């Protein structure tokens, strides 16, 4: 008889994205099951991986299907019910306290923060992605000379309605960069260089190291002033990542500087660096971490990943996130995989006498909700 220690308590999903409001065909659904830009080889499917197994096993019953029905049957039933109904069923079955949504990635294809609050029937708040705001400013027709101040102004404005900022510096320059604040001259040189390269490339994508550094320090000041955490993408992501240089220990100088400024840094997903993230959280007062969407992608192996995250990190430093994007399935599975994996570990700890059910209850409460509630400025 497993001992009850509140594994079902409501979760703060501190890093997630909107879901696709459109009905998805097989190819569109499978594209959202992967961070790759390319389809699978002929005769194979995105269902042929750990994530596919857990979609079929755990999401199928919510769509009135048998567990482990085929991927094709799953997507067909999804279309039959319609995206709005599927999104509502899956999101409302998550047992969420609230959602903290990164609105800065492919915002046109997915539900807005307000729409997510409606679909999930839970309060939803915004986390502002600093690089997306820079790109919006650059597209507005501002000059390179005026860009740095215009970015600072718009970021401050956006922060007004938000509860945190996020950086994807790992995608844009890796962590292996000079992390000191750039001088005014360096900022100007960077802005001119970046504007020229955007013109030459015919697209706006912030990847100039001086401009990125400027953003990191603008964000630091806003976070300090407003008591926002700064979310930092780490590891796992799409093909833009140079994984070896996205080990968060490359970012130690910046993390240490944020500790001095009193800015909480939340390291997101972290795979395959969950151990490095847990160690950083152990030594730096301001560092928090999660394993987010990795528990979905690891499917039946999720307890291994969460087990590594639990090896050394303080319980008061770990957070829950689904990092769901596009598919409501990723919200549903995120919480289920988290609860099941955490229960598995805590059952063993209790069984082997490492903790009491009461200790386990406290550990779940901290990771599920209380840590996020402590570091984000959430309205009551
Ligand atoms: Zn994300």
Image (tube, rainbow, N blue to C red):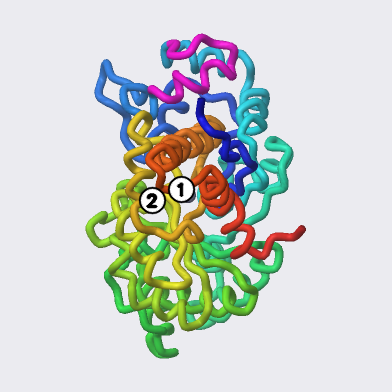
- The reply, left or right, for residue 92 in relation to residue 3 is right
User: Image point 48% across, 78% down: which residue?
Assistant: 217
Mark 2 secondary-structure assignment: loop
Which numbered mark, 2 or 1, is in the foreground of this view?
A: 1
Residue 225: where, in percent of width, then height? 62, 79
Q: Determine the residue positioned at 61% across, 49% down.
A: 12
Nearer the observer, 22 or 366:
366
Q: Residue at x 58, y 49 (%)?
A: 365
From what the image shows, is residue 149 above or below residue 12?
Answer: below
Instruction: Name the residue furthest left.
Output: 244
Span highlighted in magenta in the image: 53-69
* Quarter of the C terminus within the rendering: bottom right
Residue 317 locus on image (x, y percent): 48, 60
Dot 1 falls on a residue whose secondary structure is loop
Q: Which residue is mark 2?
A: 310
Q: Which residue is mark 1?
A: 355
Image vertical order of residue 184 relative to residue 218, above or below: below
Please tell me whether the stretch drawn in magenta is mainly helix, strand or loop: helix
User: Could one spot residue 265 in this view of the protein?
Assistant: yes
Vertical side of 359 occupied by 5: above or below: above
């Amino acid at each position: 008889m497993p001992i009850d220690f509140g594994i079902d308590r409501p979760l703060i999903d501190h890093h997630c994205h909107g879901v696709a409001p459109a009905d998805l065909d097989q190819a569109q659904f499978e594209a959202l099951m992967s961070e790759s830009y390319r389809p699978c080889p002929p005769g194979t499917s995105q269902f042929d991986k750990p994530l596919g197994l857990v979609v079929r096993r755990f999401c199928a019953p919510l769509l009135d299907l048998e567990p482990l029905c085929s991927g094709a049957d799953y997507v067909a039933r999804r279309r039959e019910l319609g995206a709005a109904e599927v999104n509502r069923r899956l999101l409302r079955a998550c047992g969420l306290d609230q959602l903290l949504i990164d609105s800065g990635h492919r915002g046109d294809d997915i539900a807005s923060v307000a729409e997510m609050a409606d679909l999930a029937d839970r309060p939803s708040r915004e986390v502002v992605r600093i690089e997306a705001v820079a790109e919006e400013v650059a597209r507005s027709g501002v000059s390179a000379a005026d860009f740095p101040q215009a970015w600072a102004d718009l970021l401050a404005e956006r922060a007004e309605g938000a509860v945190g900022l996020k950086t994807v510096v790992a995608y844009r320059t890796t962590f292996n960069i000079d992390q000191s604040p750039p001088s005014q001259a360096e900022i100007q040189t960077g802005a001119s260089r970046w504007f020229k390269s955007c013109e030459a490339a015919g697209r706006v994508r912030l990847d100039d190291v001086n401009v990125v550094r400027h953003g990191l320090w603008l964000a630091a000041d806003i976070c300090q002033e407003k008591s926002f955490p700064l979310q930092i993408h780490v590891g796992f992501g799409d093909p833009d990542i140079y994984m070896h240089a996205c080990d968060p220990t490359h970012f130690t100088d910046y993390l240490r500087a944020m500790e001095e400024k009193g800015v909480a840094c939340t390291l997101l997903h972290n795979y395959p660096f969950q151990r490095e993230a847990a160690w950083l959280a152990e030594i730096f007062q301001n560092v928090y971490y999660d394993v987010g969407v990795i528990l979905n992608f690891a499917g039946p192996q999720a307890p291994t990943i969460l087990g590594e995250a639990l090896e050394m990190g303080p319980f008061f430093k770990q957070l829950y996130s689904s990092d769901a994007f596009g598919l409501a399935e990723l919200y549903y599975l995120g919480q289920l995989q988290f609860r099941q994996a955490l229960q598995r570990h805590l059952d063993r700890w209790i069984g082997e006498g490492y903790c009491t059910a009461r200790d386990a209850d406290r550990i779940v409460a901290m990771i599920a909700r209380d840590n996020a509630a402590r570091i984000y400025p959430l309205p009551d």
